[in-house]
Amino acid sequence: MAYHSFLLEPISCHAWNKDRTQIALCPNNHDVHIYKKDGTKWTKIHELKEHNGQVTGIDWAPDSNRIVTCGADRNAYVWTQKEGSWKPTLVILRINRAARCVKWSPRENKFAVGSGSRLISICYFEQENDWWVCKHIKKPIRSTILSLDWHPNNVLLAAGSCDFKCRVFSAYIKEVEEKPGPTPWGSKMPFGELLFESGAGAAGQTAGGGGWVHSVCFSHSGNRLAWTSHDSTVAVAEGGKTCTVSSLSSETLPLLCLTFITENSLVAAGHDCYPVLFVYDSAKGSVAFGGKLDVPKQAAQKGISARERFQNLDRRASATQTTEQDLNTLHKNSISQISVLDGGRSKCTKFCTTGMDGGMAIWDVKTLESAMKDLKIV
Amino acid sequence: MSKNTDSDRFRRVDVDEYDENKFVDEEDGGENQGGPDEAEVDGLIRHIISGNLNAALLAVLKNPPINTKNQNIKERAEQLVLKVLSSFKSSDIEKAVGSLDRAGVDLLMKYIYRGFEKPSDNSSAVLLQWHEKALAVGGVGCIVRVLTARKTV
């Protein structure tokens, strides 16, 4: 478990390059810094300064080596590397609120931007005019889009929004791709078609409504969609005629990010500052809590003197030295983003988390599995 | 100046009502949810007198008036729940909470917080005891669900 503290400011967002030697991150300001791995140290090699507002999303296309960034200044830039330095290209998104998240599609011929203007901009490159054009998906989104994830078929897009719903849209652009084949989520996929909406008519949910959907993730095959919500729930939906939704109300604080590490296991992290494993059982249609994935620090147990006891009583109304409020997790503040480093979403071996404490931790799945006795990653 | 600066009625206009982008919650059929109803109430009182408090708790947590807009129904439900909660002995609270399922604990927590809103006599002390035991079972996630619920009890 490697932990590197980059800065004192929160890391707003991050993205890795293809061979995981460089990381692009935003230190909670208008710039993007690119760090390169030098043995065990990280050195800053580039600073991408173009945005006028906080950079809210970064995505690095592994094959074409382009970076797309989106910011609170309602703009997105596509950066290409020319002669060692990164050159930006402005993309007109036609939004009148801040952009919140951006993701390249699997084939890297388009990207999607979620924003506070209650719409998703799908941008693709138009060869004859040599610029990026965007199309909007508006209906029936009623609030800010917080997170996006593409389906492996390059057409379907999952969006988590502040109107408490997780939806799957079709982002089929006929100028850049052929018609996609049918999937478990649906077969007719014109641009902007809504193929799935969570919570719509879902009976038996006594909580009703739920919370903002912070993060969405498709599984490797694309047949499963998982999302985390601000009411401390994790839900998994499986595409298909039955379209079942299974959700788990967790005992932790809300989770802000999640990813599939195998077809049945999810790792999520959030305001509790540690990653958590969830296991989805397709036969039973249920999500179960798998375990807390953090290496607890060994607390030094020494005897305390009577004087210290009374001092602690004065200070924290409890006679013990270390209370449970002490944060003995790796991250010292909420974890805001999680990304898979090795192995893809079907057989992940390493994943990385960044958080509001300005640190980045790399977690090794094998080590975690052997360290936690009851952990089973199916 | 001109006549239109005389009146200041325009200052009392609620501009949010005219915002076409305003978020409106979906309307769920709440008319048939009357809260724990009369038959239940009598059954409950019998349960309490006979000492079968666990059953009383389960009964009063049934059919919560979540979707209805009628405040009276909600008030009545809250009073009933408070009555049942207060008649438990401190040592029995833990077992009672343990007999509830996940959704039940969430619902109980909602009633507890609603009870906190209007403290009366000894209610807060009793509610705090219940809160502690429910927290042990439901975790902070349970409280987060009370805070983020769009339709409360």
Image: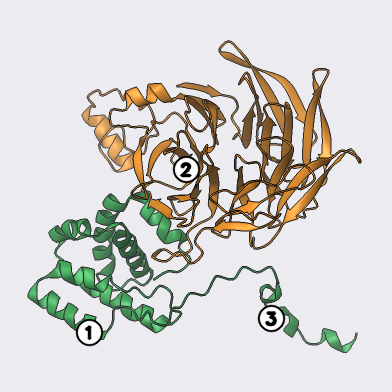
In the image, which is nearer the foreground, mark 1 or mark 3?
1
Kind of residue at badge 2:
His
Q: Classify the position of the C terminus of chain A by image quarter.
A: top left
Q: Is residue B54 above or below residue A6?
A: below
- Taking depth in this image into account, of A111 and A22 the one nearest to the observer is A111
The quarter holding residue B142 reads bottom left
Kind of residue at badge 1:
Ala
The quarter holding residue B152 reads bottom left
Tag of residue B12: 3
Residue farthest toward the top in the current orientation of the protein: A39
Chain coloured green: B
Q: Residues within 10 Å of mark 3 (few under 14, many from 20)?
A: few
Q: Is residue A245 above or below residue B88?
A: above
Kindly indicate whether the residues beneath marks 1 and 3 are on one polypeptide chain.
yes
Q: CA distance from mark 3 to mark 2?
A: 40 Å
Q: Which color was chain A given?
A: orange
Residue farthest toward the bottom in the current orientation of the protein: B3
Residue pictured at 65% horizontal, 36% vertical: A106
Q: Is residue B6 left or right of residue B13?
A: right
Kindly indicate whether the residues beneath marks 3 and 2 are on one polypeptide chain.
no
Residue pictured at 21% horizontal, 69% vertical: B57
Q: CA distance from mark 2 to mark 1?
A: 44 Å
Kind of residue at badge 3:
Arg
Total numbered circles: 3
